[in-house]
Image (cartoon, grey):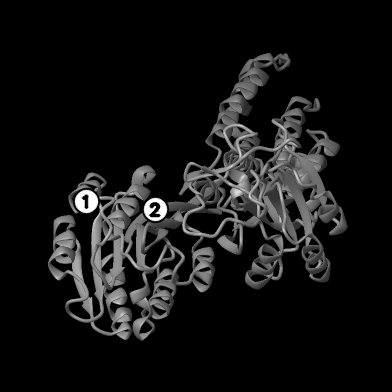
Amino acid sequence: MTFLHPYFLLLLPLYLFIVWLLNRHFRRVEFSNLKLLKKAVKSSFDYSKVLKFLIALFMVLALATPVKKHMHQANKVKGYDISILLDASDSMQEDNRFNVAKEIIANFLKKRKNDNIALSLFANYAYVASPLTYDKKSIEQMLKFIKLGVAGSRQTALNEALFLGADIFKKSDSKNRVMILLTDGINTVKSVSLQSAISKIKSFNIKVYTIALGKKGDFNKEVLESIAKQSGGKFYQALKPEELELIYNEINKLESGKVESKSYATYTHYFQYPLAVALILLILFSILYRESYSRPLLIATAVFMAIALYRPQSTKQLLTSQNDTSFAVAVDLSYAMDAKDIYPNRLSFAKTKIERLLKDLTGQSVALYAYANSGYLISPVTKDYNRLSYLVKNLEPIGIKRDRADILKLLKAINASNKELKSVILFSSTNSDYKEALTFANKHNIKLYIYAIATAKGSIVKVNNRVLKNSFGDIELFGLKSLKALANGSGGAYKTYSLSNDLQDFISAIDSKTSTQNPHNQKSELFYIPLLIAFVLYIFTLLNRRKV
């Protein structure tokens, strides 16, 4: 048992001081017979003093709020930072390995509820499909749309994948870092040496689990065993895709989160008991000494004590807003975006704009797409803006056809992956199928907010140090082709590039203002207010004693 507000106990010395003043300054009464007075004092005891003190004592105890403290232990699981590396080369087509691996990884993600997880793919080159994020649902959604060939097809950049996968942990503050590498081949790309990759892994203290999938001879067992051993991990071999699930289940058990205990306290209030005793004593005092003290003050004191005993509380309704707006951000990766009429080039400018946009968001869900000849899902809808910013910063037009900027293909990709996305902020300077794109957008109620990035004069574009030419053999100037009709026709909006922070108009227009208000009642004890008033009235009652 303890007091929640012990400072109220200081009122008891205040009461005693007031009583002392009353006794000292109370008017004298002269007696002609002093011996008779002394005899009268000896023969009678003033019980009112004891009763008055007890009333004050129990009122002060109630104000101090006696409580019983209950300690609880809450177990908190400390998660891991996990980087998953998935081989996406052509050989993964055999026995449906790639699709089976995706399903097993998706199930693995569901079991790692407290972990920060990244996903990388590799074939001709390695790239990060998702940096470390707690939004595992978006990674699961992404896995559904990832296909072979997304990172090339014929080669296996295994060492590069290890190096890039380790680099993900650069900003990790977790002590538990794990990498899971799944491959059915050997390294055939000489961009990074194995020793450099292992050194990187060791520098970040990463434990690597290597999984070899396929027949003997398809992979280099010694290399994969060495990688796992040097990092403190383990090597697994799965002859059939179905065996992968058993391996991932074992890894899940090996790398289970550590349980940390965190204590918190709850309180049971007992102020009502001393308050009830004080009220009963006050009623008794009022009956016994009603002629000596002010009845209105005694009644008022009792009324406020009764109000305090009723335990009044204030209920404050807190509303937490949740922004339900979702939209897509799409960036053109065609050759036109290499033009340098905007510093340093159009694509870099667009990426800077998107990063700035992400910093200004306030809870909206965003999906990220890229397009050229086709539309590509980079990230499903998420509120992990740091992850999106990472993906934008590292977005490069590698391994795709770039001779066109087909907005129609983009819209089809968006509609196929998420039919709920009805607003698209599009960063581009040109379009190949204006009328068809508008027809599709209107049919599916998609509004396009187009941010045009190009000068009217335009600029040449070089590919492999050769200037691009049109179908007539003339040097082509990639100038601004108006997309305003497409934007306005879809019910969206149109802007041309500027150096100012000019994308908030798009966000304001897109924001559906359908934010939900979640009510939450917060209660506060208010008994001490009427009880303090009762204490003050009680003091005034004692100060206003009648003469008898």
Judge from the rendering whether residue 349 lies leftward or rightward of residue 454; answer left or right: left
**Residue drawn at 83 percent across, 49 percent down:** 484
Nearer to us: label 1 or label 2: 1
Q: Is residue 159 visible?
A: yes
Q: What element carries label 1?
A: loop
From the viewer's perspective, is 189 left or right of 428?
A: left
Q: Residues within 10 Å of mark 1 (few under 14, many from 20)?
A: some
Mark 2 burial class by Cα count in 10 Å: few <14, some 14-19, many 20+: few
Tell me if 433 is positioned left or right of 3 in this view: right
Q: Which of 544 and 107 is in front in this view?
A: 107
Instruction: Please provide percent x and percent y for residue 185.
Output: 26, 70
Residue at the outermost front position? 473
Q: Earlier in the sequence, mark 1 or mark 2?
A: 1
| 171 lies above or below 84 | above
Q: Is residue 217 above or below residue 359?
A: below
Q: Nearer the viewer, residue 354 or 4?
A: 354
The residue to which callout 2 is attached is 262
Which disc is residue 94 wearing? none
Query: In which image quadrant can residue 30 be found?
Result: top right
How many labels, in total? 2
According to the picture, the residue beneath numbered tag 1 turns out to be 193
Give the residue type at disc 2: Lys
Left-right relation of 539 to 219: right
Q: Nearer the viewer, residue 313 or 430?
A: 430
Quadrant into which the C terminus falls = top right
On the image, the x and y values in percent for residue 331 come to 63, 51
Locate residue 111, reporting x and y percent: 41, 71
**CB under 8 Å between discs 1 and 2:** no
Q: What kind of element bears circle 2? A: strand
Residue 130 horizontal/vertical position (percent): 46, 57
